[in-house]
Every structure is written in structure tokens, then in C-alpha cells.
Amino acid sequence: MSDYKVVLQQEIQELKNKLAAATIPDELRLKVSKDIVALERSVELGSYDEKYEKVSRYIDWVLRVPWEKESQDTLDIELTKKIFEEHHYGMREVKDRFLEYVSVLKLKSMQGDQEDFRAPVLLLVGLVGTGKTTFAYSLAEALNRKLVRIPFGGMSSAKELRGESRLHLEAEPGAVVKGLCQVGVRNPIILLDEIDRSAEETRMDIMGVLVELLDPAQNHAFKDNYIDYPVNLSHAIFLATANNTVNIATAVMDRLEKINMPSYTDQEKIVIAQKYVLPELIKDAGLRPDQLIIEDSLWPKMTRPLGYDAGIRTLQRTLQGVVRKAARIIVEKGYPQV
């Protein structure tokens, strides 16, 4: 028996051990066991190279899926308020809607109705830089849930969401299952980011998968083409964002609850920059807060360097440049502050 064959047999035994220790559905366990038996036969016959690679990779993905593991929710309305106030300025109506959302989750939890409860899917609609994505991260922090972000910008195929059949050599699961594997729990917040920006030529196929993800009647048995076994997504909380709703299919919109994200005034941008953005940038650059002083008269000019911008990304980029220059001057010239 060749050394290579012995090594493969040892690796197959390791796969068996992993399968025995894993928590997966019984039907899937039987299916994977049959794959391992077929793999053993191919090794005995000496025709194992490509098949072994495909089967072992598939089993590895199957065992990484969190079929039952969950994180414990923190449903504390005061903590949620505190987190929103720490990370977001103004936006009272948006914050109130999220607080209502968390309140309903808490009441359902207290009543023991979580199994039957399906949280509404909120769609945050607003221009670039208005805080849509950061609100999702704040909600995840408040609920003590992991967050999976799936960007739709430029998504060119529904396969990116649903995966590709493992019959193909380089096949992998789709972004949804990959996200679950990455965070290791089946109940994360799944952020469907910029769902209006998928590629036009495949948009309807992608919207079809979105309907399946968002529909409680279907998402308890989501079919990933690679895993080839229903994945229960009913324990996850879905959030979606979009710049506008023009390119979103009606069937998808019917399953979403829209929240409009208002644009910031210049004064609001200045407050956000002073209170949230600049302190974080100074910290990231290794500076002390007293080492960079920006005069009040400069803020209006930095807010509109190129004209009106609904969000704060332009101002954020401007401040990044200022902080970098300040760090260099302090290091090169030894100034205590600039």
C-alpha cells in the first residue's frame, strides 16, 4: 500500500470522527456517511484524487454550518437607547422605530412566543452616508447578535447568494451560508446591503432568491445549491438597505417595512464629525485628543468642499486626510499639537 493511500485513509478516518462529533440533521448525516463510504471505495480502487478533494471540502462546509447553535439575545430597551445615542446623532424617528422593534422582540420573548414570531424585515432607504449600515451594526450590538453583511453592489449572479452545485470543481456555498459559517450561529442579523444595486441583467434572479430569504413560509428551508440540504434561516433577523426602491421588485417590497433615512443638515454633519467621527479617527491614528485642534471657522468649509452631500462620507474622508497630515507633522517636526 502506498504512503499516499495510507495518508488518505487516515484523513478519511478523521472525517468520520468529525462527523460523529458534529451536530447536524440525521438525514444529512446519513447522506454524508454515504459520501464517505463511496470515498473509501474510490481510495481502495486507486481513483481518488479529484473525488477526495471535492467530497472532503463538501463535508468540511457541512460541518461548519451552525445547524443548531445560537447566541443569547440581550433585550434591554435602555441599553439599546444608550447604544443608539452613542453611535448616532439625531434621527429621532428612526431610533424610535428601532426601539419599537426591540420592544416587540422583548415582549414576544417574555411570552415564550419566539418560535412562532417572525420579526418584520426593516428596509432602510436613504442616500449614501446617511447611516444605514451603521444602524444595523448598532442593532446587532444592542441585541448581542452576530452580524452577517451581504453586499449586493455589483452582484452579478444569484449563485453568489445561493451557491453552486458541488458537481462543479470550484463550487462553494453562497454568501448566506458562508456568513452563517463565519459567525458560527444560526441566529445572526443578516444585513442585505444595498439590495437595489445588483447587476441589471441578473436582477430578477437575485430578487427571486431575496423573496425566498425574506418569506417566513420559505426561509425555514432555504436551499443552498452547494450544501444541497434545507438550511433553517427562520431564527435570523433580516435587515435590508437601499439608496432608493426603484430597482427593487414589488414581490420583495411586499415583504419589507420601509424606513426613510433623512439627509443631514450641514450643522448636523458638524456635530456628528466633532462628536463621533473625529475622536475615532484621532484614536485610530495614535494621537491624543489635545494634539489636533480644528478651529470653528473651518468646519463649514470642510463640510462642503465639493458642494452638497447628503451624508457624511465626504466630510469623513476630508477629516481622515487632516488627521494623517497632523500625525506626520507631529512625528517629523516634533510639535506637541497642530
Image (spheres, helix red, strand yellow):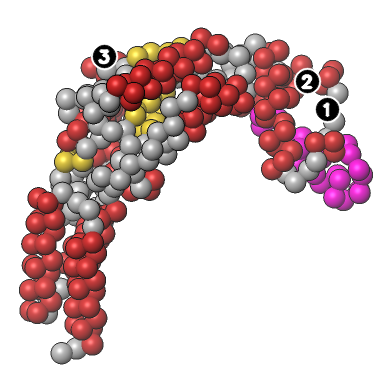
Task: Name the residue that disc number 1 marks.
Answer: 294
Amino acid type, residue under disc 1 in the picture = Ile
Report the disc number at residue 299. Answer: 2
Question: Which residue occupies 92% across, 44% down?
Answer: 335
The quarter of the rendered structure image containing the C terminus is top right
Amino acid type, residue under disc 2 in the picture = Trp
Q: Quadrant of residue 197?
A: top left
Report the disc number at residue 254. Answer: 3
Which segment is the magenta one?
Answer: 316-338
- Image position of 239 (left or right of 21): right
Amino acid type, residue under disc 3 in the picture = Asp
Q: Quadrant of residue 101?
A: top left
Question: Which residue occupies 17% across, 25% down?
Answer: 217
Q: Secondary structure at mark 3?
A: loop
Tag 1 and tag 2, C-beta contact below 8 Å: yes
Q: Secondary structure at mark 2?
A: helix
Q: Nearer the viewer, residue 257 or 296?
A: 257
Query: How far apart are the two marked residues, 3 and 1, measured between alpha carbons?
Result: 47 Å
